[in-house]
Amino acid sequence: MGQTIRILGIDPGLRRTGWGLIACEGNRLMYLACGCVETDGKAALAERLVVIHDGLSRIVEEFRPDEAAVEATFVNRDAVATLKLGQARGIALLVPARAGVLVAEYAPNLVKKTIVGAGHAEKAQIRMMIGILLPKADPQSEDAADALAIAVTHAHHRSSMLLKVAAR
């Protein structure tokens, strides 16, 4: 086959940041691990960001991914919530980048379209397709399932992303 690439998918969130790790060897995808970094909703924002940072740092250190992918932020009607999500997303981008891991970003609709075939798929559809694409995966939360979907999306789109990086 080819070289095995370990891909870390991250679904940033202030309450729960989902993470999922897969291995990609050619067209073959293999589930490795997944979970969530959870924060205390009553804690100060700075403390919650530290928990996310430390949790993702442990995951990167333990699993040593070759590449990472983070879901891009969508803007909703609540500007304050969007800004807070952006701060959690900043941590999700920073941690792998500081470890020397190449980080890609994918829009939520592209993730849904890649996994389900429709850009406006429901979370239950994503979870069901993750079970088909990665039969050994058993994510315990939607956040972990979404993170695995982000990793799978990167596996499918990584060659075009790597070409963009090389062109810079």
Image: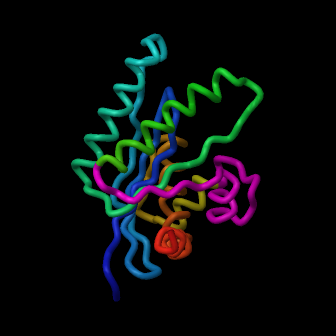
Q: Residue at x 35, y 25 (%)?
A: 50
Question: Extreme bottom residue here?
Answer: 1
**106 up-or-down from 85: above or below:** below
The boundaries of the magenta stretch are 99-125
Please count the marks in the image.
0
**61 up-or-down from 26: above or below:** above
Q: Within the magenta stretch, is there residue 58?
A: no
Q: Nearer the viewer, residue 34 or 57?
A: 57
- Compared across the picture, whether 102 is left or right of 82 comes to left
Q: Within the magenta stretch, is there residue 113?
A: yes
Q: Residue at x 31, y 59 (%)?
A: 65
- Compared across the picture, whether 158 is left or right of 37 comes to right
Q: Residue at x 43, y 72 (%)?
A: 29
- Compared across the picture, whether 130 is left or right of 30 comes to right
Question: Extreme left residue here?
Answer: 62
Q: Residue at x 59, y 55 (%)?
A: 106
**40 up-or-down from 115: above or below:** above
Where residue 33 sits in the image (x, y, percent)? 35, 54
Where the N terminus falls, by quadrant?
A: bottom left
Where residue 97 sits in the image (x, y, percent)? 36, 50
Where residue 57 sits in the image (x, y, percent)? 29, 40
Where residue 81 sits in the image (x, y, percent)? 64, 24
Q: Looking at the image, what colour scheme do you see?
A: rainbow
Question: Extreme front residue here?
Answer: 168
Q: Nearer the viewer, residue 73 or 8?
A: 73
